[in-house]
Image: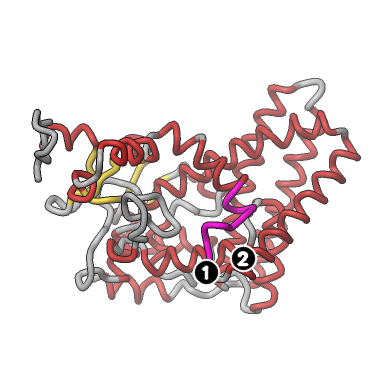
Amino acid sequence: MTIAGWLRVAEHYAACSLRRSVQQLAATVVLLVGGYAGMVLTVERAYPLTLALAAFTALIMIRAFSIQHDCQHGSYFVSRRANAWVGRVLCVVTLVPQGHHRRLHAVHHAVVGHLDKRHPGGAFPRTRADFDVITVREYLALSPRDRWMYRFLRHPLVIFTIVPLYLFLYSYRFPFLHPAGRRRGWISTQCTNLAIAAGLCAAALAIGPGRLAAIVLPTVIIYSIVGVWLFYAQHQYRGTYWEHRPDWDFRAAALLGSSHLVLPRPVAWLTGSIGLHHVHHLCSGIPNYRLQECLDDHPELAQISRLTVADSLRGLQFALWDESRRRLISFAELREACPPVRDPAITSCG
């Protein structure tokens, strides 16, 4: 089937159900409250169980983000006001400011896979609202210092430590680097910050700051790391899609440049089917609880951009877009193709 045909298929599922939305939202709230209540009861007597509950609760936070994300797209409720208010309440749980992230995410959908829509400033083009990706040609044109910086930014340890810290402690708290809609972005982030601070203060008064830290810190650490990994796996894989204009196509970028991350069914349910990203990008009007339904009804769609968890972890090595082979490659593959030369004035593979 053509990409246009898949778009028509996906559009059939772009209808929310008030009953299913309310049921999923209620179940998510119950699971969140249950997870935190269990941690409060076990934090002093059975801390290993607390940590297990922290991992469970982190997945429920991702489920809450999936609902908030649907609200940002206006796909969770028919009512625009209901989408706005549910998203604003959930951002206190997810730590992701609703209005600010909605604008960033809209940019992400609009330019995904578009090589000419990256910011040209700095040592190398910076990808908007995504992980930085440059081509082999651009990498070879960099100075040794800038090559080191790009390699540093793409290192798995950086992706799973510095990137979560940057997002949740800086970018989502103080949107200095996102001038578009700056005033509204600041209002969104600071209202979210105040609500989070108020919630933490109330919890600290209720159970004590020490117990609160022992509960919240591992939960948020797991949540942020898993969240960054999921976002990374959604677009960073061997056969993803990148094009220059005029060859770039929005529908092709949506379907071929977004992955179908195959998660165990219980994990997929807990995380709101967040791994079915290719269907979501193809039609962002589909609520998360109908993504699996679309895939089940059309098994051939499940084979497009399919990625296992092991594939996603192996894909952490792929950091450069090879325009000739139309795929991401690793630095090791680049070294094999372009052995170093002795004369620093000569660029290997130039």
Does residue 253 appear in the picture of this structure?
A: yes
**Quarter of the figure with residue 108:** bottom left
The residue under label 1 is 180
- Model colouring: secondary structure
Q: Secondary structure at mark 2?
A: helix
The residue under label 2 is 185
Q: Nearer the viewer, residue 243 or 63?
A: 243
Residue 6 pos. (x, y %): 31, 70
Q: What is the distance, in whole Å, between disc 2 and disc 1 at their CAs?
A: 8 Å
Q: Which residues are magenta?
A: 170-180
Q: Amino acid at mark 2?
A: Gly
Q: Nearer the viewer, residue 340 or 303?
A: 340
Q: Is the C-beta separation of discs 2 and 1 under 8 Å?
A: yes
The residue furthest right is 205
Seen in the image, is 286 located left or right of residue 171? left
Residue 308 pos. (x, y %): 36, 41
Q: Is residue 188 above or below residue 169?
A: below
